[in-house]
Image: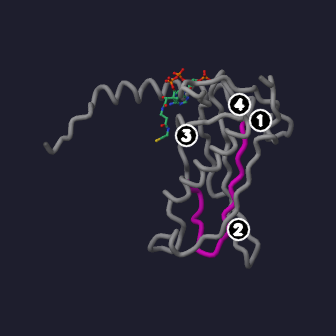
Amino acid sequence: MIKQKRCRESFVVKTSIVQPPDTNNYGTLFGGKLMAYIDDTAGIAAMRHARKAVVTASTDSVDFLHPIYEGNSVCLEAYCTYTGRTSMEIFVKVIAENLLSGERNVCAISFLTMVAIDEHGRPAEVPQVLPESDEEKSLYATAKDRAENRKNRRKDSEERAKKYGSEYPWQ
Ligand SMILES: CC(C)(COP(=O)(O)OP(=O)(O)OC[C@H]1O[C@@H](n2cnc3c(N)ncnc32)[C@H](O)[C@@H]1OP(=O)(O)O)[C@@H](O)C(=O)NCCC(=O)NCCS
């Protein structure tokens, strides 16, 4: 197993144009569509880092900071910023561009946790991350705190899932 990999080795860029079928009544990109793009891009970055199959374990909050209009390009950048033993934190930045004026906005950022799995579907070890640029170093330095928050959040979710159960309330 390779011990460390550079962030740029997992770097993914996906750019597309917002077409009418992907928009809501206000002519802006559906939030759910953007979340699917984010998950896809993060999954590819995680597979590039681990060179293994991966599953999404969690997505941190996604704040939609600016609308993305029909005709804009939407560019997603993703790379692995930090790892545990089997989990990878993937940072995704979403940049929309008005292709006529050139104006660009960072419309969303998100952190996802992807877990590498082996041929039996069990969590499998991944290489560590070697951050190089200022952005990578800054994200790496703050990742432990985010991982700790996720641990607590997972515990809360598991407790709530147990508490509220799987009965259909209308039956
Ligand atoms: C994610 C999953 C593989 C974890 O498996 P598990 O048997 O519970 O294994 P563990 O508890 O040892 O967790 C494995 C790693 O994932 C991390 N992890 C698990 N759940 C997590 C969560 N909700 N958020 C962040 N990290 C999580 C653990 O911290 C651990 O990291 P580490 O090895 O780097 O320390 C399992 O819960 C699963 O398959 N979930 C469904 C995934 C899925 O179907 N995704 C698609 C969405 S529909």
Q: Secondary structure at mark 2?
A: strand
Q: Residue at x 46, y 70 (%)?
A: 24
Mark 2–mark 3 contact, CB under 8 Å? no
> Of callouts 1 and 2, which one flags the residue occurring earlier in the amino acid sequence?
2
Image spot of residue 1 (x, y percent):
77, 23
User: How many residues crowd mark 4 within 10 Å: few (<14), some (14–19), many (20+)?
Assistant: many
The residue indicated by pointer 2 is 97
Q: Is residue 40 above or below residue 56?
A: below
Residue marked by disc 4: 82
Q: CA distance from mark 4 to mark 2?
A: 28 Å
> In the image, is the residue at mark 3 within 8 Å of ligand 1 by its beta carbon?
no
State yes or no: Cβ of the residue under disc 1 lies below 8 Å from any atom of ligand 1: no
Q: What's the magenta region? A: 64-80
Label 1, label 2: how far apart the Cα atoms are: 25 Å
**Residue type marked 1:** Ser
Residue depicted at 80% across the width and 23% down the height: 3
